[in-house]
Amino acid sequence: MTDNLRGAVLMSLAMAGFALEDMFIKLLADALPVGQILVLLGFGGAVAFGVVAHRKGQQVLSPALLTPALLLRNAAELVGTVGFVLSFVLASLATASAILQAAPLFVTLGAVLFLGEKVGWRRWTAISIGFAGVLLIVRPGMAGFEPASLFAVIGVIGLAGRDLATRVIPNAVSSYQISSWAFAMLVPAGIFLMLAMDHAVIIPSLAQILTLAAALGVGVLAYYSLVASMRVGELSFVTPFRYTRMLFALIVAILVFGERPDGLTLIGAAVIVAAGLFTLWRETKVT
């Protein structure tokens, strides 16, 4: 297996894992407060990656945590994760996942606005078309509008900010440290949600504990696979496989939750993916 193929497989496995994690969270949200779920998953993930970092001789509580880039990344991770989780818990998993596919377009836009990168008219056109795809899915002011889908837009903005901040994090900071801190940010986010929604802590049943463990397990493995995929093969070959998450999310939404995405949602998702793939292709041509 070539490095490119290995990276593509790892990226696809990561996207499948994230889709399964979303499924477990949505299933749990019928019985447990969303904030409590985030606290438990965040604590478990932070400990898991913290142990790995410690075994590799890396400090989890490092002074690097206070660098502006990491503080910004962690804040953006908090906004992005909470927004996306609320969107698929309160609305449709298929809709939220379709909007999530616009994240690379937001990253390109942010790189122009904040990092001084140059983008030609072709990529500007692709970004505009991709945003039109988002409007097809959200449909503000139309009969099919779901207010909860706006949480997905907030989530995409947060996750794009996270990716932008990651670009300027010092190389001395390892992926395991970053991952541990990213999961840790879910703890205060979950506590905030519980206080804001006035939810009390619920003692989970055995079945719910097992579901939480499954969500944590696939979430940690997916995050690890994502990091590993970006270190194997060429980024221009591996990155487009991020869009397989849309396919996995549709399968879960239809088979597990009985969702039936309408035509506009599917068209919007296709437009976003096409615009994102074109943007990635153009980046390989101009670099």
Image (tube, grey):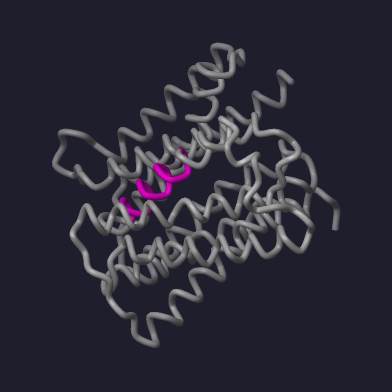
Q: Position of residue 38 (x, y in %)?
A: 40, 61
State the residue at coordinates (30%, 52%).
Answer: 192
Quarter of the image holding residue 27?
A: bottom left
Residue 102 as seen in the image, left or right of residue 168? left
State the residue at coordinates (67%, 58%).
Answer: 225
Residue 126 as seen in the image, left or right of residue 87? right
State the residue at coordinates (48%, 65%).
Answer: 21
Residue 252 as seen in the image, left or right of residue 111? left
Q: Nearer the viewer, residue 227 or 254?
A: 227
Q: In the rendered view of the protein, which quadrant contains the C terminus?
A: top right
Residue 211 visible: yes
Residue 243 as seen in the image, left or right of residue 255? right
Q: Position of residue 276 (x, y in %)?
A: 54, 33
The boundaries of the magenta stretch are 76-88
Residue 277 visible: no
Residue sticking out furthest to the right:
2
Q: In the rendered view of the protein, which quadrant contains the N terminus?
A: bottom right
Q: Relative to 34, is 113 above or below?
A: above
State the residue at coordinates (72%, 46%).
Answer: 174
User: Is 90 contained in the magenta span?
Assistant: no
Q: Nearer the viewer, residue 34 or 279?
A: 34
Q: Relative to 270, is 88 above or below?
A: below
Q: Position of residue 171 (x, y in %)?
A: 74, 36
Most common secondary structure along the magenta stretch: helix
Q: Relative to 12, is 147 above or below?
A: above
